[in-house]
Image: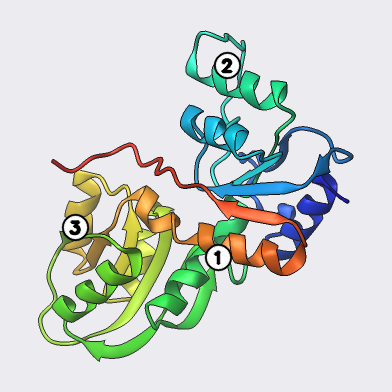
Amino acid sequence: MYTLGNVLEILDELAPIELAEEWDNVGILIGSKSDSVSKIMCALDLNEDIADEAITLGVDCIVTHHPYIFMGIKKINYSEATGKVLRKLIKNDIGLISMHTNLDKTKDGINDVICKGLGVEIIDVDNFLRWGKIIPSTLEEFIIKVKKFFDIDLLRVVGDKKGKIKTISVCSGSGSEFLNQAATVSDVYITGDLKFHEAQGAINKGLVVLDIGHYNSEKIIIPYLVDYLKSKLQIDIINTNICAEVFQTV
């Protein structure tokens, strides 16, 4: 029999809790280390649909990337979205573990998985940011590769690059704070959540940014997380079938 504590220990081997930012909220968010675990569901985010899915499928542990309990909660109102989800998990004895910035930063975490998938030979790592070399290609060729890897039809492109691109920097999620650094080491920066004036700044620095969206930039880690847990635990481990992306393109 496995416990929630066992699951946390195994996840900590992949993405040590100590790597998480001070403002983050990772580890066991619902439950106790002694709670038994027989079936795990992995998801990027948690919402009521995913909670219902977990209940229907007999899941007793959910592992997410984004912490559902993040900002200070002053009340748990069962008529509100957060309260409904927390009530369902607690009532059905479903534990919740989140691995957030520690999974972004760790070796073989989200950003390393992206680099590997896009053929980026990592030269340097600085906190969240990775940068490295690729086989020289045109921007258009590289965009096709990015769309295929992330399984997306559309992305936002900032700037332009004539000739071949050779260096790439990567920061999943919201990486605008690293624009200046990315501009000094790479031709193209892959991230999400770019704002208008930040995009202007990137153009002024001669940096091409591929904004693939926050959700799209991180969803690729969930199948990887499922496979990792399957290699460590002899229980049923599944990926949610529900997309929790909040933006729609119409």
The quarter of the displayed image where residue 87 is located = top right
Image: 136 above or below 81: below
Image coloring type: rainbow
Q: Position of residue 199 (x, y in %)?
A: 21, 53
Report the residue marked by disc 2: 83
Report the residue marked by disc 3: 154
In the drawing, what numbered circle is on residue 224? 1
In the drawing, what numbered circle is on residue 86? none
Image position of 184 (left or right of 29): left
Kind of residue at disc 2: Gly
Label 1 or label 3, whichever lies nearer to me, is: 1
Near-viewer residue (86 or 240): 240
Image: 3 above or below 56: below
Kind of residue at disc 1: Tyr
Query: Does the CB distance between marks 1 and 3 fall below 8 Å?
Result: no
Image: 108 above or below 2: below
Q: Residue at x 12, y 70 (%)?
A: 160
Near-viewer residue (189 or 244): 244
Under tag 3, what secondary structure? loop
Image: 172 above or below 160: above
Q: Residue at x 28, y 71 (%)?
A: 148
The residues tagged by marks 1 and 2 sit, at their Cα atoms, a distance apart of 30 Å
The residues tagged by marks 2 and 3 sit, at their Cα atoms, a distance apart of 34 Å
- Local packing at callout 1 (Cα closer than 10 Å; few below 14, some 14-19, many 20+) is some
Tally of numbered discs: 3
Q: Residue at x 37, y 49 (%)?
A: 214
The quarter of the displayed image where residue 18 is located = bottom right
Residue 176 seen by the camera? no
Image position of 148 (left or right of 160): right
